[in-house]
């Protein structure tokens, strides 16, 4: 999804979010209708909250993917599991062990090596990325709360509806809509398709397993993102970013092994 965004980065951010959200709503409603599942859901307040948080996190993530190296933007987003672990302990009462605290500190160190606070010329994208990661972690925690009452597609559909509505309002006031050509329309369509698939499977996973475990698998995005950006955009992370990525991946694996043993 974020790889494709690099091809349409000349478009306004809210326009990309709108097209992505529109396709998510279309796909979700069609499938929900075929399965005879109520679109409105049960816990509407939490569903709307999930949608709003998803909109904020997604907008920030897309922005960093456009402005920063793709690998750096993805690794900032992968700090979500770090925040999810904290939130799952506080709000979901999931257990955390002493060994995990040291591993979380390693994760934080890796994040610092990637963000390099004080050493970047422009810190604003880093700040946006960190904020979107925190908001994304809260959104993931809400999914975990909704797991017993809502179908995954209902949750995904709310994200699409809320994000689409808010991005459309933003486009209206900014008055910066750009009419896409056929190729850009194809790219936007695939952004929507890949985003819908990612949202559905992530939501389904959070319903089936503890948030602190599922979130670790999101680190696979780092490999895919770095591989694709290197081949197509010749984007290569610097030495400190590479060390930070390694630390974060190693800490996530160690955390998984501790949970597996316990």
Image (cartoon, rainbow, N blue to C red):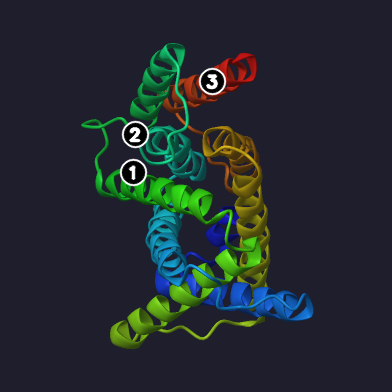
Asked if the residue under mark 1 is in contact with the one under mark 3, i.e. CB atoms within 8 Å, the reply is: no
Q: Can residue 12 be seen in this view?
A: no
**Label 1 near label 2: C-beta < 8 Å?**
yes
Looking at marks 2 and 3 on the same chain, the residue that comes earlier in the sequence is marked by: 2
Q: Nearer the viewer, mark 2 or mark 3?
A: 3
Residue 76 lies, with reference to residue 14, above or below; the image says above
Q: Which mark is residue 56?
A: none
Q: What element carries label 3?
A: helix
Q: How crowded is mark 1: few (under 14 residues within 10 Å), some or many (20 or more)?
A: many
The extreme right residue here reads 34
Q: Residue 255 carries which label?
A: 3
Label drawn at residue 130: 1
Q: What element carries label 1?
A: helix
Closest to the observer, 251 or 91: 91
CA separation in Å, label 3 and label 1:
21 Å
Q: How far apart are marks 2 and 3 (CA)?
A: 22 Å
Residue 139 in the image, given as x and y percentages of width and height: 44, 53
Q: Name the residue under label 2.
A: 115
Up/down of 34 relative to 78, above or below: below
């Amino acid at each position: 999804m974020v790889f494709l965004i690099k091809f349409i980065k000349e478009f306004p951010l809210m326009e990309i979010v709108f097209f992505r959200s529109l396709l998510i709503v279309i796909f979700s409603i069609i499938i929900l209708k075929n399965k005879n599942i109520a679109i409105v859901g049960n816990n509407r307040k939490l569903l709307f909250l999930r949608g709003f948080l998803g909109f904020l996190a997604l907008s920030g993530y897309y922005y960093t993917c456009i402005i920063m190296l793709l690998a750096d933007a993805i690794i900032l987003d992968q700090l979500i599991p770090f925040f999810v672990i904290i939130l799952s302990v506080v709000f979901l009462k999931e257990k955390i062990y002493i060994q995990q605290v040291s591993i979380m500190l390693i994760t934080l160190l890796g994040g610092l090596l990637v963000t390099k606070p004080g050493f970047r010329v422009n810190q604003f994208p880093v700040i946006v990325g960190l904020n979107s990661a925190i908001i994304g972690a809260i959104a993931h925690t809400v999914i975990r709360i909704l797991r017993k009452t809502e179908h995954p597609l209902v949750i995904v559909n709310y994200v699409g509806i809320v994000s689409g509505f808010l991005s459309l309002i933003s486009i209206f006031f900014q008055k910066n809509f750009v009419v896409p050509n056929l190729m850009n329309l194809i790219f936007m369509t695939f952004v929507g398709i890949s985003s819908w698939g990612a949202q559905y499977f992530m939501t389904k996973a959070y319903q089936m397993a503890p948030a602190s475990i599922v979130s670790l698998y999101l680190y696979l995005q780092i490999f895919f993102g770095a591989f694709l950006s290197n081949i197509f955009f010749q984007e290569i992370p610097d030495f400190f970013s590479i060390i930070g990525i390694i630390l974060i991946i190693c800490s996530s694996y160690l955390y998984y092994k501790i949970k597996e043993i316990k």
